[in-house]
Amino acid sequence: MADRTQTDPVRMEKIVSLCKRRGFIFQAAEIYGGLNGCWDYGPLGAELKRNLKDYWWRVHVQERPDIVGMDGAILTHNSVLEASGHVNGFTDPLCDCLLTKERLRADQIPAQSGVAYWWKGAAAKDGSWSTKKEFSMLVPGTDEKSAKTARKGAAQYYAQISGKKLQAADIELTEETTEEVTDSVRYNPANGSLVTEARSFNLMFKTTIGATSDENDPSATGWLRPETAQSIFCQYKNILDSSRMKVPFGIAQIGKSFRNEINPRNFTFRSREFEQMEIEYFCREEDGFRLTDEWLENCLVFYENIGIPRDKIHILDVPQDELAFYSKKTYDLEYQFPFGVQELQGIAYRTDYDLSTHQKGSGKPMEYFDEVTREKFIPHVVEPSAGCDRTVLAVICEAFDEEELGKDGKSDIRTVMRFHPRMAPIKAAIFPLLKKNAEQVRIAREIEAELRPFMNVFYDETGAVGRRYRRQDEVGTPFCITVDFETLGEEGDPALKDTVTIRHRDSMEQERVAVKELLPWLLKRIH
């Protein structure tokens, strides 16, 4: 069982730093102070994310005869989300810290115990202001240090709400009492301040559609989709009729979704704009549980094939009393991030809830007609739904490594991203040993030109070759190709003419490969 409390903030800080330094991920609108919960992928991050999406699509759509793809609209009709329950039910419980005004998810505040200090109100020491508004602070005990912390926080709170230019030192607290509390969720764990009562907060981004639209006109109301699933359900019948698929079959989609998260956090893990890789797999009711287990195994194999070992994936069989109301069975696949164990993917048996709901909401038939048995029925659905950005982050965290290569007491740390070759942003780097050697440069450039149509490569001739290796290690390039004097036939064994040195990232071992065999040699290892 994974230890959910185990974190490694130092490692996470190094990963975030590397991502910015080497062009994987940047804060959106950073020059203007940043847009919280939104991220931009730089050159290497865009390549990494594209590699993930392309491989996911290849495995789940192109290599399977029973799954087809679609690309749905981001703007979503109000009626779609009314029928699905999102308009009225897609909410999180929100509360505010009374001291800092920080917004918190009420259901994520941990239970805390200690001593609660209460005050019936406060007044300015000069008599210019007073209030009878209650406030409370939670501290460990009644010792002098705890009491001082509580009173300081309370004075700051009352100074803020006074509406005057009062400081905490100008406040006199009134009618102080204390009580011991156990497992309370009424206090901000960061500072002990009382929080407001929880209220529902709709997570969707609302917009109006049309140049002359009125925001109060329901027919003009639209939403940025909160998930990709609903467009699949809405187009299920069109795809079924046009593609001549037969149950069981799936519809896959990769696309952006938007949720106005109360508290975006943990780098790209919880964001307001994110990408999903999702399949809705339609089946008979009697096959639902079996297919849910089959998809669990399929997903575990997929993660292994992108560089996340099976033993790093924690499988949570969601208890019956914690299932979503539409689900009969759900597995959560979780990964041990440096900030704790968190969900990568859900595999949910959603029954026939979604198609039945849209049949009722739209008045359009959603039944499937089985030509063999001559029966009509609404298919059930198994949904493997993965977060693309979360998976990219997991791949980065799994790949990050620091290797000590120092000798004789001297430290020499090699930072290396051990990406699986099929995920690596740069597949191969090409170096001439000496940039002043025109023949080495010519051959290196020819190799670059030959490889570039088939993969992302990088040419580098600056600095000592050892430094070039280290630069490529830090971005995860699995193979470095060096054109040297043996390539020219000027040194060593004449049989090595027209061969190059290939240096392996993980082992740092080297081998020689003929120039004419480079392309098939690399293609075999990166796909």
Image: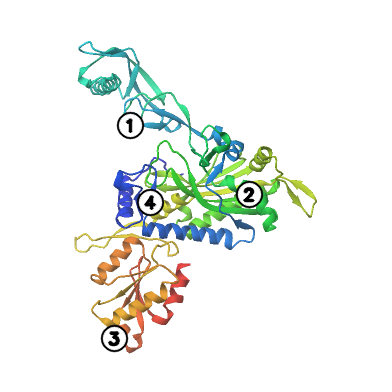
Residue drawn at x 55%, y 35% as measured from the top left: 87
Hey, which residue is sitting farthest front in the picture? 212
Per the image, label 3 sits on a secondary structure element best described as loop
Circle nearer the viewer, 4 or 3: 4
Alpha carbon of mark 3 to alpha carbon of mark 2: how far? 65 Å
Residue drawn at x 30%, y 20% as measured from the top left: 161
In the rendered structure, the answer to whether residue 264 lies left or right of residue 256 reads: left
State whether residue 486 is above or below residue 233.
Answer: below
Of the two numbered discs 4 and 1 on the same chain, state the one appearing first in sequence.
Answer: 4
Of the two numbered discs 1 and 3 on the same chain, state the one appearing first in sequence.
Answer: 1
Alpha carbon of mark 4 to alpha carbon of mark 1: how far? 29 Å
Residue 204 image position (x, y, % from top left): 49, 38
Determine if residue 323 is in view: no
Circle nearer the viewer, 2 or 1: 2
Residue 400 image position (x, y, % from top left): 35, 56
Picture quarter containing residue 285? top right
Residue of label 2 = 235
Residue of label 1 = 190
In the rendered structure, the answer to whether residue 32 lies left or right of residue 221 reads: left
Q: Amino acid at mark 4?
A: Asp
Alpha carbon of mark 2 to alpha carbon of mark 1: how far? 46 Å
Q: Which mark is residue 40?
A: 4
| Residue density around tag 1, few if under 14, some if 14–19, many if 20 or more, within 10 Å | few
Alpha carbon of mark 4 to alpha carbon of mark 2: how far? 30 Å
Of the two numbered discs 2 and 1 on the same chain, state the one appearing first in sequence.
Answer: 1
| Residue density around tag 3, few if under 14, some if 14–19, many if 20 or more, within 10 Å | few
Q: Which mark is residue 492?
A: 3
Of the two numbered discs 4 and 3 on the same chain, state the one appearing first in sequence.
Answer: 4
235 and 222: which one is in front?
Answer: 222
- Mark 3 and mark 2 residues within 8 Å of each other at the beta carbon: no
